[in-house]
Amino acid sequence: MKILLVDDDQELCELLARYLQREGIEVDQVHTGPEGLKQGLAETYDAMVLDIMLPGMTGLEVLTELRKTSQMPVVMLTAKGDEMDRIVGLEIGADDYLPKPCNPRELIARLRAVLRRSQVESQAQTADVIRIDELEIDHSQHHVLKNEEPLELTVTEYNILNTLVSHLGKVVEKNQLAEEAMSRSLTLFDRSLDMHLSNLRKKLGAHDDGKARIKTIRGVGYMYVAAGA
């Protein structure tokens, strides 16, 4: 596994890099926003750890540009208690976030979860294509088409859709969805799953009759509903 660490705190970078390397993860470091974007697009990485407060470009700006051409998993580092940055990061395509100062072991756990989701999908050998209404989900290519046009989904969004579709017409409990799609349990006040679902709904759009594709069952979970159901 190869990770790009983008943070202007070089002392923290060295600390995190040592922990990651102990786990057998190769780490490259850069310390400005423009360097992070350039390196992230120029090299092949399994994931990026991206701080929000960076010189040259903010982490949010880097992520916005990155998502135009890359779906590489991104874990964002945010200021402790700064919920707005976390919400915006998830809205524009972050796969997960961790408040700073972070515990290196927790960062490794989050990275493993993100990488596990990404690798399971990329290593899938099945050529099955699922078609629901105007959606086409191709497991072998890890992509989704709507009316034959590609939808740019993050790894997490893809996994959420795939999980819901695999339980078509049935309610998936919130914690079950987090476990299956994000490979981790939700913590108190954790809104990451809600934000990923919000992004996914926007990208999918409603059915032609205006009804939502993903229905919220209040207090229980979520359900993908086919057209006319």
Image (cartoon, rainbow, N blue to C red):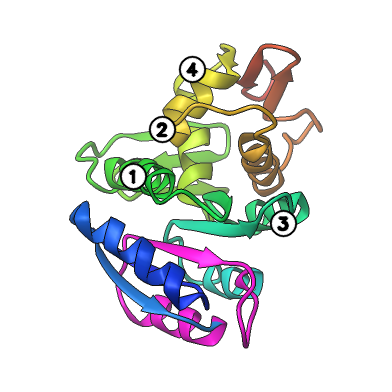
Residue 50: where, in percent of width, then height? 51, 66
Q: CA distance from mark 3 to mark 4?
A: 29 Å
Q: Quadrant of residue 101?
A: bottom right
Q: CA distance from mark 1 to mark 3?
A: 23 Å
| Magenta span | 33-59
Tell me the quadrant of the picture where the C terminus can be found.
top right
Residue 172: where, in percent of width, then height? 55, 16
Q: Nearer the viewer, mark 4 or mark 2?
A: 2
For label 1, count other residues whose C-alpha is less than 10 Å away and answer few (under 14), some (14-19) or many (20+): some
Disc number for residue 183:
2
Secondary structure under tag 3 reads: helix
Of residues 46 and 165, the one drawn nearer to the viewer in this rendering: 46
Q: CA distance from mark 1 to mark 4?
A: 25 Å
> Where is mark 4, residue-wise?
167
> Where is mark 1, residue-wise?
112
Label 2 amino acid? Answer: Ser
Label 1 amino acid? Answer: Arg
Residue 108: where, in percent of width, then height? 36, 48
Of callouts 3 and 2, the N-terminal one: 3
Disc number for residue 88:
3
Residue at image coords 28%, 46% = 119
On screen, residue 115 versus residue 83, left or right, reads left
Residue at image coords 56%, 28% = 186
Of callouts 2 and 1, the N-terminal one: 1
Q: Is residue 126 magenta?
A: no
Secondary structure under tag 1 reads: helix
